[in-house]
């Protein structure tokens, strides 16, 4: 079954190693195959990875797009250890993300990491108001 992707005018997405930019009209694409796909809204750029959990997302994104995800594992697990040390309450969320990685569900791990980033945002805002 093909993946249906609807793009807004000018919207970009990553398909495998390629960045594809839509023209000036809405477009609907049907994509068949196993190449990793990331829509623009799911892409985190390097300069946007300004918190520890966003850095985890960035490394996961690199894993998802890579032909050899294991090359990013060492950095990923170092970042996870740092976050766990600073905020032990993230443990259950990180365990869930790790389970997704171990079962090859890297896209689902990315989605779970968005929840981790939101939780991190809450933790940081609580520290600032205290």
Image (cartoon, rainbow, N blue to C red):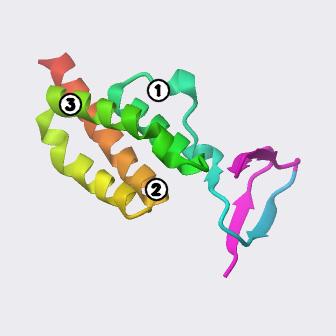
Disc 2 + disc 1, Cβ < 8 Å: no
Residue 72: x, y in percent? 46, 38
Span highlighted in magenta in the image? 1-24
Instruction: Give the Cα distance between marks 2 and 1.
Output: 18 Å
**Discs 3/2, front:** 2
* Residue that carries the numbered disc 2 in the rendered image: 106
| Residue 47 in magenta stretch | no
Binning the other alpha carbons within 10 Å of mark 1 as few (below 14), some (14 to 19) or many (20 upward) gives some
Q: Which mark is residue 85?
A: none
The residue shown at (67%, 71%) is: 3
Q: Could you tell whether 56 is left or right of 37 in the image?
A: left
- At 81% from the left and 45% from the top, the residue drawn is 21
Q: Which image quadrant is residue 101 in?
A: bottom left
Q: Earlier in the sequence, mark 3 or mark 1?
A: 1
Tag 3 near tag 2, CB within 8 Å: no
Q: Secondary structure at mark 3?
A: helix
- What numbered label is drawn on residue 49? 1
Quadrant of the snapshot with the C terminus: top left
Nearest the viewer among 109 and 120 is 109
Q: Residues within 10 Å of mark 2 (few under 14, many from 20)?
A: many
Viewer-side residue, 48 vs 85: 85
The answer to which image quadrant residue 46 occupies is top right
Query: Can I make out residue 60 in this image?
Result: yes
Q: Give percent across and percent down for residue 19.
A: 76, 43
Disc nearer the start of the sequence (2/1): 1
Image position, residue 123 (x, y; %):
20, 30
Q: Nearer the viewer, mark 2 or mark 1?
A: 2
Residue 123 got which mark?
A: 3
């Amino acid at each position: 079954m093909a993946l249906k992707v609807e793009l807004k005018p000018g919207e970009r997405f990553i398909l495998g190693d390629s960045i594809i930019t839509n023209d000036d009209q809405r477009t609907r694409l049907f994509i068949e195959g196993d190449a990793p796909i990331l829509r623009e809204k799911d892409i985190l750029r390097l300069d946007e990875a300004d918190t520890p959990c966003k850095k985890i997302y960035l490394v996961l994104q690199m894993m998802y797009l890579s032909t050899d995800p294991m090359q990013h594992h060492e950095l990923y697990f170092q970042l996870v250890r740092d976050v766990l040390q600073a905020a032990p309450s993230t443990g259950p969320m990180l365990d869930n993300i790790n389970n997704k990685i171990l079962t090859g569900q890297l896209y689902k791990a990315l989605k779970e990491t968005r929840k981790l980033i939101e939780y991190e945002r809450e933790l940081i805002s609580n520290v600032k108001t205290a």
